Image (spheres, grey):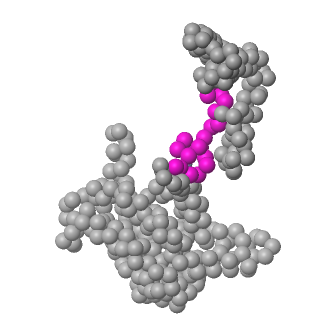
């Protein structure tokens, strides 16, 4: 509460919020003098009451019935004060800061009874920063292995397989989770190439991997290949193009884990093939894994990259595990949302 608030005790966001609330209160009190008057009077009565309770005025101690009267007066004034606020359409909480986090009041820490611990809002904020740094799109921010529902995959057996769609998805999710668990920097880690039709949940799986990497403190970059090409092309109009292009490519070559979503949606061209080769080749030589998703079969992907296609995919297969995610979970999820 602003009047009793010791601003120096708080730092950063909490302090800002308190100061903001104080400003708001001063503004309201200026605009509505009757609010200020009622509030000030109420505060003085409350002060008098608490002092009477602890017996500060020892010389002429208040009688019990006088204290009772004071209590009644406070209650009555409080009612009037609230009525004035209501009449002027002012929230009862107008003096309170608007906390972003109700749990820790934006101080970032909570007392658990014995010691201060970091509040979950700080962890969430850090997570968000890492998601942004990794270029993870917002629709994948909440994708996690623990919250993924594989029951969206059918329980009937897939074509040319002994597994059901569900069992197959379970196997692939397990492989993906194991990849993250076992990942060690500067060691060879086998990545994944995930082929599957539209709506089979490939992007969601990439989101789960990205968020699990964040939990383990491992840096990643998520790209849709067509976006990356667009980004590189856009540097050609600028003053120092080779430097920028180099930096963009270096970033995806050097990041510990590279996630390429939806390879094959870009326009097929020599340019697309040569950039992809540069990325894959360096990662191959330096043994850095790729998690790649595509709607295309490997044969069809090769055809999309006539130049170096053979070499690109030979390297990709050498360094990564190839799996097929099947089923159409997107339709099921949409159906469910419409029913809800
Ligand atoms: Zn918090």
User: At which x and y percent is residue 158?
Assistant: 23, 66
For the point 78% across and 76% down, the residue is: 240
Q: Is residue 173 left or right of residue 184?
A: left
- Please give the range of residues in magenta: 88-111
Q: Is residue 308 something one can see in this rendering?
A: no
Q: In which quarter of the image is the C terminus?
A: top left
Residue 233 or residue 252, whichever sits in front:
252
**On screen, 208 above or below 33?**
below
Q: In which quarter of the image is residue 5?
A: top right
Q: Does the magenta stretch include residue 101?
A: yes
Residue 325 or residue 108, whichever sits in front:
108
**On screen, 133 above or below 68?**
below
Q: Does the magenta stretch include residue 261?
A: no
Residue 266 or residue 53, whichever sits in front:
53
**On screen, 117 above or below 167?**
above
**On screen, 52 above or below 297?**
above
Q: Is residue 149 something one can see in this rendering?
A: yes
Q: Is the magenta stretch mostly helix, strand or loop?
A: loop
User: At which x and y percent is residue 237?
Assistant: 76, 70
Q: In which quarter of the image is the N terminus?
A: top right
For the point 77% across and 17% down, the residue is: 33
For the point 46% across and 55% down, the residue is: 142
Q: In this view, does 131 lie to the left or right of 19?
A: left
User: At which x and y percent is residue 159?
Assistant: 22, 68
């Amino acid at each position: 509460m602003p009047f009793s608030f010791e601003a120096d005790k708080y730092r950063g966001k909490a302090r800002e919020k308190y100061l903001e609330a104080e400003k708001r209160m001063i503004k309201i009190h200026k605009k509505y003098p009757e609010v200020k008057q009622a509030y000030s009077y109420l505060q003085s009565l409350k002060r008098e009451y608490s002092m009477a309770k602890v017996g500060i005025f020892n010389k002429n101690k208040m009688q019990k019935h006088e204290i009772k009267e004071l209590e009644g007066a406070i209650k009555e004034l409080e009612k009037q004060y609230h009525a004035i606020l209501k009449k002027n359409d002012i929230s009862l909480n107008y003096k309170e800061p608007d906390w972003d986090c109700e749990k820790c009041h934006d101080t970032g820490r909570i007392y658990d009874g014995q010691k201060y611990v970091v509040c979950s809002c700080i962890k969430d904020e850090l997570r968000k920063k890492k998601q942004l740094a990794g270029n993870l799109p917002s629709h994948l921010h909440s994708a996690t292995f623990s919250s993924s529902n594989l029951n969206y995959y059918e329980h009937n057996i897939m074509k040319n397989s002994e597994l059901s769609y569900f069992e197959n998805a379970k196997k692939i999710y397990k492989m993906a989770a194991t990849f993250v668990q076992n990942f060690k920097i500067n060691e060879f880690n086998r990545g994944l190439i995930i082929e599957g039709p539209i709506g089979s949940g490939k992007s969601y799986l990439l989101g789960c991997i990205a968020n699990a990497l964040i939990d383990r403190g491992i840096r990643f970059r998520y790209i849709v290949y067509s976006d990356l090409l667009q980004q590189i092309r856009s540097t050609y109009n600028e003053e120092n193009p080779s430097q920028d292009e180099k930096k963009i490519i270096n970033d995806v070559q050097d990041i510990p884990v590279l996630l390429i979503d939806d390879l094959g949606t870009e326009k097929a061209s020599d340019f697309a093939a040569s950039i992809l080769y540069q990325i894959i080749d360096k990662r191959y030589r330096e043994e850095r894994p790729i998690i790649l998703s595509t709607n295309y079969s490997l044969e069809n992907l090769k055809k999309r990259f006539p130049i170096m296609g053979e070499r690109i995919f030979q390297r990709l297969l050498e360094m990564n595990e190839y799996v097929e995610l099947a089923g159409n979970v997107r339709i099921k999820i949409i159906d469910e949302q419409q029913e809800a």
